[in-house]
Image (cartoon, rainbow, N blue to C red):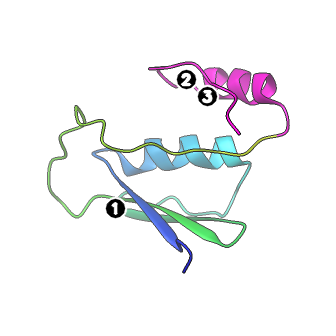
């Protein structure tokens, strides 16, 4: 079994999708305000709002990325305007 999709629920689909497209270096031409698929290496990242207000205070998700240069990617995240809750940590 593999995870085929991760869906992020948000009040601002375009803003969050643009962040992840910038982070992952993906330009798929999608700019929908309700639902966007962001596809990368066999796993789909979906950003979605089905018309209901989301409680963005919930921090119940953690995404982990495997990268070659953690400092380079951290600078990229900062440049994209992310609010950092916890700085990156190298893990096995």
Magenta: main secondary structure: loop
Front disc: 1 or 3: 3
Q: Which residue is the site of mark 2?
A: 81
| Relative height, residue 3 to residue 45 (above, below) | below
The residue range painted magenta reads 68-92
Q: Which residue is the site of mark 1?
A: 34
Give the number of marks: 3
Q: Residue 67, percent across and down?
A: 77, 41
As drawn, the residue found furthest toward the right would be 68
Q: Residue 74, percent across and down?
A: 69, 24
Q: Residue 85, percent across and down?
A: 44, 20
Q: Helix, strand or loop at disc 3?
A: loop
Task: Report whether 13 appears left or right of 45.
Answer: left
Question: What label does residue 11 carry, if any?
Answer: none
Which is more N-terminal, label 3 or label 1? 1
User: Looking at the image, do the residues carrying marks 3 and 2 touch, with CB atoms under 8 Å apart?
Assistant: yes
Q: Nearer the viewer, residue 36 or 43?
A: 43
Task: Report whether 65 appears left or right of 8.
Answer: right
Q: Helix, strand or loop at disc 2?
A: loop
User: Rounded to the nearest whole Å, what is the CA distance between mark 1 and mark 3?
Assistant: 21 Å
As drawn, the residue found furthest toward the front would be 92
Question: What label does residue 80 carry, if any?
Answer: 3
The residue under the point 70% across, 28% down is 90
Task: Report whether 92 appears left or right of 82.
Answer: right
Label 1 Cα neighbours within 10 Å, binned few <14 / some 14-19 / many ≥20: some
User: Looking at the image, do the residues carrying marks 2 and 1 touch, with CB atoms under 8 Å apart?
Assistant: no
When asked about the image quadrant of residue 55, the answer is top left
User: Rounded to the nearest whole Å, what is the CA distance between mark 2 and mark 1?
Assistant: 22 Å
Q: Nearer the viewer, residue 51 or 88?
A: 88
Q: Helix, strand or loop at disc 1?
A: loop
């Amino acid at each position: 079994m593999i995870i085929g999709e991760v869906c992020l629920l948000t009040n601002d689909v375009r803003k969050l999708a643009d962040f992840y497209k910038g982070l992952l270096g993906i330009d798929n031409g999608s700019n929908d305000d309700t639902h966007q698929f962001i596809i990368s290496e066999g796993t789909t990242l979906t950003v979605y709002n089905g018309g209901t207000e989301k409680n963005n205070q919930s921090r119940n998700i953690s995404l982990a990325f495997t990268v070659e240069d953690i400092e380079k990617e951290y600078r990229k995240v900062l440049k994209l305007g992310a609010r950092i809750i916890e700085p990156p940590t190298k893990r096995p």
